[in-house]
Amino acid sequence: MTSSPPQSLEDRVRSIVAEHRDDRGALLPILHAVMEDMGHVDPAAIPILADELNLSRADVYGVITFYHDFRQTPPGRKTVRICRAEACQAVGAAQLADNAKERLGVGFGETTPDGSVTLEQVFCLGNCATGPSVQVDGRLYGRVSPAQLDGMLEVGA
Amino acid sequence: MTASGQVATVYVPRDSAARSVGADEVADAVAAAGRPVRVVRNGSRGMLWLEPLVEVETPAGRIAYGPVAPEDVEGLVAAGMLDGAADHPLCLGPTEDIDWLRDQTRVTFTRVGVVDPLSAGDYVAHGGLSGLRRALSLSPEQVVAEVTESGLRGRGGAGFPAGIKWKTVLEAGAELKFVCCNADEGDSGTFADRMLMEGDPFTLIEGMTIAAWAVGASEGYIYVRSEYPDAIATLRAAIGTAYDQGWLGKRVLDSELSFDLFVRVGGGAYICGEETSMLESLEGKRGMVRAKPPIPALEGLFGKPTVVNNVLTLGSVPMILADGPAAYADLGVGRSRGTQVFQLGGNIARGGIVETAFGITLGDLVERYGGGTRSGRPVRAVQVGGPLGAYLPTSRFDLPMDYEAFAAADAMVGHGGVVVFDDTVDMAGQARFAMEFCAAESCGKCTPCRVGAVRGVEVIDRIVAGVDRKKNLKVLGDLCDLMTEGSLCAMGGLTPMPVKSALAHFPDDFGTTTEEGR
Ligand SMILES: Cc1cc2nc3c(=O)[nH]c(=O)nc-3n(C[C@H](O)[C@H](O)[C@H](O)COP(=O)(O)O)c2cc1C
Ligand code: SF4
Ligand code: FES
């Protein structure tokens, strides 16, 4: 990492928008880029995006809230997503989900109070013959046993 | 070095299902095994219960080993794996002779698992581009006619004839037209789009380029769900290579065609697989379903004439153009022509990709290919066609996989996913989940879907709890009818299918008698 001076939220958002200036219907690619850069879409970014893209704040807010991927609060240090769809249900996904909630003491969509883990549900990861499936920080795991899941939930790991 | 003095070529899949069960670690172990090897990260052959499946190239063809754990590699190498030795319990013999694979008819998936997905040289050496070259030697009208003659129908679920859609777009007068590939693949139990994009991305690119020529489009978008990061990365890399090779961009293969192709990433919303919702999303908006008409072929992306096709539909086009429409149409039954890439998942002993002509029975797929359940318990129910598809009992295993035969049985083939459950499944729970899923994923535009699904969960809970059972069964039936009749799209319109099929075939799970269940 080179040490560049810290950019303000506004500068970062405007420079992301600039990179997508030529994209048609650029809001989704921009929101994904903001998520990648900052881990979440800070509500303070909404008026900046609206201004840059010539949209109303309500339009931008509406898009952010429509899609499960875009969150407005920072996630935990680790994000664990458990597949709850049918093919994984058939091989024990419900038990994995229950175990995770119990161990972490949070529900789906929540982050542990110490900020270590965000737990999410997901409907299918395209790994339906090698389930149950879990995604940890974007990395996919298949045939996940309860013991393996315990390891993934390990705090500080 | 191998015994014959050559550097051994070893294939370890980069497919995300293989990676999810340790393929990267296996590839590292093979590379570190102490002998010089060339490791190729191929796509998966689709025998997912054998992943990670390692193949070694020998003069007698590729020899398979699987499922290989990283800690197996040392022993395999000691036993002569790098020379293709058979003397190890994990050796499966020549890959092509494994009957599960040998008995399939691989058309769309012909190169998946065979080639290095990102090698342009491999692609051309294995027949790539011959479809596009032939298409560019024909007029757009001729290409559309061949796609129509092949009988190819949309693989995304609805089964609409691809040629008719293309003809509409071709005949629409407009300066700007689009080709959009629906790679949202949200159905549980389906992963063929993903495996084609990860295992042979140039085929999809070629199919879209042929579509662009056929309809007069200059720009294309592949809308991939965000749950597929590996597919997104592979597609982006492949598109970069295709530009470098002159397969995309200005004057494709020195023809008059110019075509630019972009990857767009979804936002984790199931409804964005519905084509008009996908178009809204591509325009940067909420994925609210549009009323039809106008149809996307006439007023699609940004109001322009647009082809929207599934990955497998577009991925079948290069073979159809290369080998001629008759070869494709010769496969299949009735109005379901060609092959379908079936996907076996859930509680299944031998899960994966079975590409075969339409007409194979459900029982053949689940038992002959699938080998029954992974748990070893009896099969009780099979859901075909994703979360909006019917639950079928084993007594329906005689059903041929054919759009019309399934429709006649109040079921659907959909995107070809087959999800198996053993006898521990609670079918009232599955029916409840169908409603819960609809409530969570509804775009919210119409009341029968948005509110009906929430009511559906409550009513099923009451039935199972034995509260006013008879009355609530009637309420559930009426609610299903309302959703079927009154929903704008198939999300609300088809959610009753898993619910009603569960009730019809497994009434005992709802704590009721068969009479009441009906
Ligand atoms: C709720 C819903 C979800 C859908 N999801 C997908 C999908 O993930 N992929 C897909 O190709 N088609 C999906 N479809 C079907 C599309 O609307 C459309 O029919 C298809 O993309 C057309 O391409 P095809 O003719 O090649 O199948 C879905 C439809 C509905 C109603
Ligand atoms: S049926 Fe559901 S998903 Fe489809 S348009 Fe209506 S509310 Fe939206
Ligand atoms: S249902 Fe879990 S990965 Fe597909």
Image: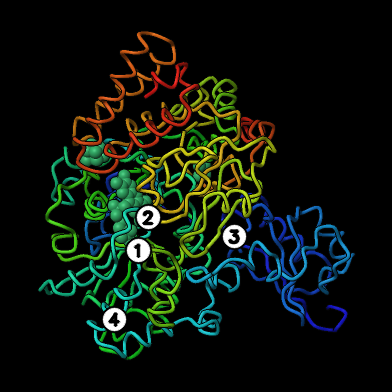
Q: Residues within 10 Å of mark 3 (few under 14, many from 20)?
A: many
Of the numbered discs 3 and 4, the one sitting upstream in the chain is 3
Which residue lies at the image location 26% right of the left edge and 84% below the top edge? B142
What SS does tag 4 mark?
Answer: helix
Q: Is residue A56 above or below residue B280?
A: above
Read off the residue under disc 3: B46
Instruction: Say whether mark 1 and mark 2 are on the same chain.
Output: yes
Q: Does the closest atom of ligand 1 sit within 8 Å of the Cβ of label 2?
A: no
Residue nearest the viewer, comparing B419 with A141? B419
Q: What chain does mark 2 sit on?
A: B
Read off the residue under disc 4: B143
Task: Please state which amino acid type lies under the numbered disc 2.
Answer: Tyr
Read off the residue under disc 1: B335
Q: What chain does mark 1 sit on?
A: B
Of the numbered discs 1 and 3, the one sitting upstream in the chain is 3
In this rendering, does residue B207 appear at all? yes
Q: Residues within 10 Å of mark 4 (few under 14, many from 20)?
A: many
Labelled pair 1, 3 in contact (Cβ < 8 Å) = no
Residue nearest the viewer, comparing B243 with B355? B355
Of the numbered discs 1 and 4, the one sitting upstream in the chain is 4
* Residue A118 in the figure: left or right of residue B215: right
Q: What chain does mark 4 sit on?
A: B
Q: Does the closest atom of ligand 1 sit within 8 Å of the Cβ of label 4?
A: no
Q: What chain does mark 3 sit on?
A: B
Residue B403 numbered tag = 2
